[in-house]
């Protein structure tokens, strides 16, 4: 077998990071941005796409260079739909290679390892040929660094002498293995006719023939020859345990390996010095390939629902920018058959934290989650569900939603809510996003508004961005007094938002204005015939 002496480039190709070693550097040099499982669960990220080999936190970042790199990756996919299909085709190959390696490492049989090696190389060459035939024709159209590097690597590998040689060796070895149809076994007997020694006498490229009379009649051949069985050795497989079958197959594979041991040694050298290196970089891409393909499918589904999509303009974290026009909640878009009501939303110097009030089922939770999902999608490198968007990434998203599994036995529900709020203050920074939905709803309005006011004071002094969606209208009324105390001390401004009611019906529009709790009550009362005028009309009929 030919020697392979060419130097192999073993560096990783990443669809999501501009530097091969970026993840390590990023973790070592500064505090990594975080997306916790709790936040992912409360924002229902699994509804957007269900990941198996990774989680959303694995790819969440606040690094602008990484986000822009990913935007280019997804733009390439949008402009070249075939890329998504190619990545999908890669997944079964990579899964099978991974499984073969697991089986090979678990097996103690050298013959099995030999066969696994052949199967792995067959998968590798098939995968590379697929990429050569389908990815490389798209190369002239590719603009992203990720896919250009990927295409260049595939072009180098498939055009190399290595690849030509390995295909030749593969064809030679697989043909030799596949030509094996039977083996002739010799058994030495002792004086008492007990098996004393056994071995393979020959490897044959045809199967032996049964010595049964019926078989001979059908062949019209009554001669005995070297390939005619005159008596079965054992009722093969019938009645045998798994261990017995394994022992027999292992013995045969071991004998074949012994016959081809020189080929096996040379083959393993190829595996160790070439194939393993070049499949490793593909296998390490598996989580990224899964994420990119699932994300591409999500984008396609959102487009089919008529959801607006745009790649946001990314601004430095210090600007704390967020300005979205026509913002939609992607989960609501996927769940509804009809159009979703869009809203404009922004954080600015007059409002980095909002108290959002309004009627139940008026869209408060929807817009709160929509803002959080916009940050997540933007920082994963995906387009966001808006007509346009400017965003400064946040280092972490803290959510405080009703969980349904509160630790109320020891603390009580209010105690549990306060405990979770207190834990946020241990980690929140000025670059964080805090989303509170109906927090402190487990107590009376006076106590809830008092604690909530203290919480808002704290977040204002931290300087983070946030939304406090609440039914506590007293809290909304205290915004001016909170600002009067916090802003002179260096805190950010708090402002009001309301979920609007129009003609007694929920409009799902979010307005930046002071709430009027009585007006909501009047509209609802009038809608259901419970205003005083309508009550009196009913009484007087």
Image: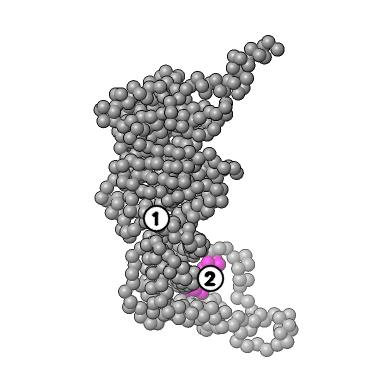
If the image is split into quadrants, where does the C terminus sit? top right
Which residue is found at the position 43% from the left and 26% from the top?
A: 514
Q: Name the residue under label 2.
A: 248
Q: Which of 532 and 450 is in front in this view?
A: 532
Which residue is found at the position 62% from the left and 65% from the top?
A: 239
Chain-order first, disc 1 or disc 2: 1
Extreme residue in the top direction: 540
User: What secondary structure characterizes most of the magenta part?
Assistant: helix
Please provide percent x and percent y for residue 100.
47, 65
Secondary-structure class at tag 1: helix
Q: Is residue 126 left or right of residue 160?
A: right
Labelled pair 1, 2 in contact (Cβ < 8 Å):
no
Q: How many marks?
A: 2
Mark seen at residue 70: 1
- Residue range (magenta): 244-254
- In the rendered image, residue 251 lying in the magenta stretch gets the answer yes
Mark seen at residue 233: none
Q: Can residue 340 be seen in this view?
A: yes
Distance between the alpha carbons at the discs numbered 1 and 2: 53 Å
Please provide percent x and percent y for residue 498.
46, 29
Quadrant of the rendered structure where residue 414 is? top left
Q: Nearer the viewer, residue 488 or 150?
A: 488
Quadrant of the rendered structure where residue 110 is? bottom left
């Amino acid at each position: 077998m030919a020697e392979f002496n060419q130097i192999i480039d073993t560096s990783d190709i990443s669809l999501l990071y501009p530097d091969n070693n970026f993840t390590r550097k990023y973790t070592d040099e500064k505090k990594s941005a975080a997306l916790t499982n709790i936040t992912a669960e409360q924002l229902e990220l699994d509804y957007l796409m269900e990941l198996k080999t990774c989680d959303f936190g694995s790819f969440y970042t606040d690094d602008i260079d990484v986000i822009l790199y990913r935007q280019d990756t997804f733009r390439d996919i949008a402009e070249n739909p075939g890329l998504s299909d190619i990545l999908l085709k890669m997944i079964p190959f990579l899964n099978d290679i991974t499984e073969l390696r697991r089986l090979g490492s678990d097996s103690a049989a050298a013959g099995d390892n030999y066969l696994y090696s052949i199967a792995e190389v067959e998968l590798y060459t098939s995968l590379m040929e697929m990429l050569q035939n389908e990815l490389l024709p798209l190369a002239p159209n590719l603009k992203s660094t990720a896919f250009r590097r990927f295409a260049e690597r595939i072009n180098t590998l498939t055009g190399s002498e290595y690849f030509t040689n390995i295909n030749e060796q593969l064809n030679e070895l697989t043909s030799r293995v596949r030509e094996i149809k039977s083996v002739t076994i010799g058994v030495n007997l002792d004086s008492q006719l007990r098996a004393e020694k056994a071995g393979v006498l020959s490897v044959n490229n045809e199967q032996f023939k049964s010595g049964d009379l019926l078989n001979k009649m059908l062949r019209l051949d009554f001669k005995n020859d070297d390939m005619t069985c005159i008596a079965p050795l054992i009722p093969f497989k019938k009645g045998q345990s798994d261990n017995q079958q394994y022992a027999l197959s292992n013995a045969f594979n071991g004998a074949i390996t012994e016959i081809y041991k020189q080929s096996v040694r040379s083959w393993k050298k190829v595996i160790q010095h070439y194939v393993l290196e070049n499949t490793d970089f593909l296998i390490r891409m598996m989580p990224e390939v899964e994420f990119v393909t699932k994300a591409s499918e999500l984008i396609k589904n959102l487009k089919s629902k008529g959801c607006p999509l745009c790649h946001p303009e990314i601004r430095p974290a210090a600007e704390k920018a967020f300005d979205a026009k026509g913002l939609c909640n992607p989960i609501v878009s996927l769940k509804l058959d009809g159009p979703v009501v869009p809203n404009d939303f922004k954080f600015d110097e007059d409002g980095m934290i909002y108290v959002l009030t309004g009627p139940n089922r008026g869209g408060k939770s929807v817009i709160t989650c929509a803002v959080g999902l916009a940050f997540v999608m933007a920082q994963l490198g995906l387009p966001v569900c808006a007509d346009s968007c400017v965003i400064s990434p946040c280092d972490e998203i803290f959510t405080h939603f009703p969980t349904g599994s509160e630790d109320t036995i020891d603390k009580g529900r209010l105690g549990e809510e306060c405990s979770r709020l207190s834990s946020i203050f241990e980690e929140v920074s000025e670059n964080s996003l805090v989303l509170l939905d109906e927090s402190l709803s487990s107590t009376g309005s006076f106590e809830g508004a008092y604690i909530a006011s203290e919480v808002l004071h704290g977040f204002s002094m931290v300087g983070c961005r946030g939304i406090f969606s609440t039914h506590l209208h007293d809290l909304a009324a205290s915004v001016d007094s909170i600002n009067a105390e916090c802003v002179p001390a260096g805190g950010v401004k708090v402002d009001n938002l309301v979920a609007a009611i129009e003609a007694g019906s929920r409009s799902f529009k979010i307005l930046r204005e002071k709430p009027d709790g009585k007006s909501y009550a009047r509209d609802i009362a009038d809608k259901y015939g419970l205003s005083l005028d309508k009550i009196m009309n009913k009484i007087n009929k």
